[in-house]
Amino acid sequence: MSLNKNFSSDGKLFTIQIKGKFDFNLVQAFRSAYSEIGDKTPKVIIDLRETDYMDSSALGMLLNMKKSLGDSVSSIQIANCKPQIKKILQISRFDKKFDID
Amino acid sequence: MRILVVDDQALNCTLLKFMLEQESHEVFCVSNGKEAVEQFSGINPDIVLLDVMMPVMDGYEAAPLIKKQASDVYLPIIFITALDDQKSLTRCLEVGGDDFISKPFDKIILSAKIKAHTRTRELSQKSFEQKKLLEFHQNEVQREHEIVEHIFKNALVEHLKVPDIIDYHLSPASMFNGDLFLVSPSPIGGLYIMLGDFTGHGLAAAIGALPTSKIFYSMAHKGLTVGEIASELNSMLSDLLPGHMFCAATILEINKSGRSVNAWLGGLPEGYILDEIGQVKRELESQHMALGILESYEFEDTIVHFEVENTDRILVFTDGIIEASDPNDEFFGEERVLEIMSCSRQAKIEDVVNAVYEFTGDIEQQDDLSLALIRCKATPLPDDEHRTFCQIPITFNIKLEHQQLKTSDPVVQFVDLVCSIEGASEHRSNLFLLLSEAYNNALDHGILGLDSQGKDTEDGFYEYYIQRAEVLSQLNSGFLNFTASYLPEDQNVVFTIEDSGKGFCTKLSHNADNKAHSHGRGLGLMEEIASGVSYNDVGNKIKINYCLNERANNA
């Protein structure tokens, strides 16, 4: 379980990558990751390619992020989900609130 | 030297033998051509002194037969002759003679001629040995190349299953290719593509291709990011390659829909995004130094991200294409490449390759030529393999006391346990979700007695987890029972989680959508994913049914 974040070289893309388990254990790390976004209104990608597990606390964290960032980012995309993770997001109707790739 | 004297006159033989033995040669005498031919291989002479006129077989007849028996080393045949008419002498040379010595013999001339022919013989012997040695080495190198070629073929070419959305061309300047083109499907759909160009060409350049492909494929199979792949390749290559060698590379990841691309660009000439009529939409300019130069701590794994249309194409190539030069040393250049790609919708990379060959004419190919054109189409997920399910019933029981609840987060261990049942591991994520929700509900509400009301606001959400950690750390009673039982008849697993709490109310409505509240979503999710979720009367024991065979589920 870990979280990585980085800006693309042009500063237009902010990526948060979550490895392993996405649950309440990441509450603090996740919140502080998106608090650094600043005022360049980048596009945010939550890259879940290495996320094997998530539960409803992760969904809560994603919603909180969306509320908190508001217009300070151009869009939030949840990307590279494994099929089962994608299904969890779809069941939760997250496709209506996020751009799920 | 071993000298064979062939003369029917015993006096000549004796005389020659005497004179030559004084010069410390070993001398053998036979009395006609037939004997010379028959005994040749036994005597194995270095020089033959051959009389012309002899009974049984004369010198003219014997000379070609003797030469024929001599191996690849030059064997001088010196005719002993009293003849001095031009015709006879010419004939001697024609049948393979190399020189003459006239009767009566002059000791000084004989000695000089033998010395001269000895030198020639020795030179020939030396060059014959060198030739043999060279042949041996050539065979050795050939054999080694064949082995290496075999390995390369198996490691690189056989592995390369290129989907039909990619056209590529690789033409090495020598037997081994210092350019490298790798494609691998991603476990989450989509493709990874790498075009690399090692310094130089030939075997030395190609040698880095083996570990590179191994790392690329293994990381691609895990679905890692292009930045991570680049970083790993860089650290391997900087350890492996000598200082003056490196690998310029473009590593691309195209997602499942074919609309989103991540690229790590290090040291290759610019790539291009072309629209359907071949116009450049975007240039992919190199952002980084080539792989294998920087130390890990200096390396940058930042990537370029861009969106494309499904009609777009990505064109990448190595410098061999644009630096191919014509007889006047003019480069082929990017402009010509782009011009060809834009002159027709059907323009193919073969058109570029043919144009390069036409441009360079008879000039030998200087560098490896590689280019690839990737159509940005959707790529489906790799096919699911046929699955089998466990044939025996299995039950797990775990009881956790408050000490263990305090210090461990056992959900992943529960999942691992259940996944040891054959057929369950594909369901890892779902099993985690179900068990995580059930376990955390039992712990948070049943045992710790927390209330989720405050979770509605962002701050409340975080406070909830802070409070949870605090209450958990002070826990000094309570327990939790986890059971899982699998029945092979219907490939169904039944989980129960029972807590020592009073039981919580289940009449509250739980809905997966739940008006964007940050909590209360869990139960709805569980109901969607499991085939059944129920509670006992008190509400301190949840029972979840989950079927491992989705096909049976759908039926």
Image: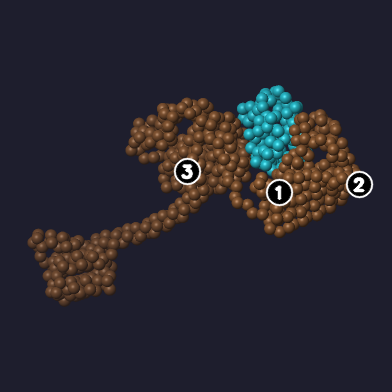
Chain colours: A cyan, B brown
The answer to whether residue A35 is left or right of residue B20 is: right
Q: Is residue A30 above or below residue B409?
A: above
Q: Is residue A73 above or below residue B82?
A: above
Tell me what residue is drawn at x 69 percent, y 43 percent: A52
Percent of width and height locating residue B7: 16, 72
Residue placed furthest toward the bottom:
B10
Percent of width and height locating residue B356: 39, 35
Q: Which residue is mark 1?
A: B547
Q: Tag 1 or tag 3, which sits nearer the N-term?
A: 3
The answer to whether residue B107 is left or right of residue B534 is: left
Using the numbered discs, state the Cα–Cα distance from disc 3 to disc 2 in whole angstroms: 66 Å
**Disc 2 sits on a residue from what chain?**
B
Mark nearest the camera among 1 and 2 is 1
Amino acid found under the numbered disc labelled 3: Gly
Q: Which residue is mark 2?
A: B476
Classify mark 2: helix, strand or loop: loop
Q: Is residue B426 above or below residue B30?
A: above
Classify mark 3: helix, strand or loop: loop
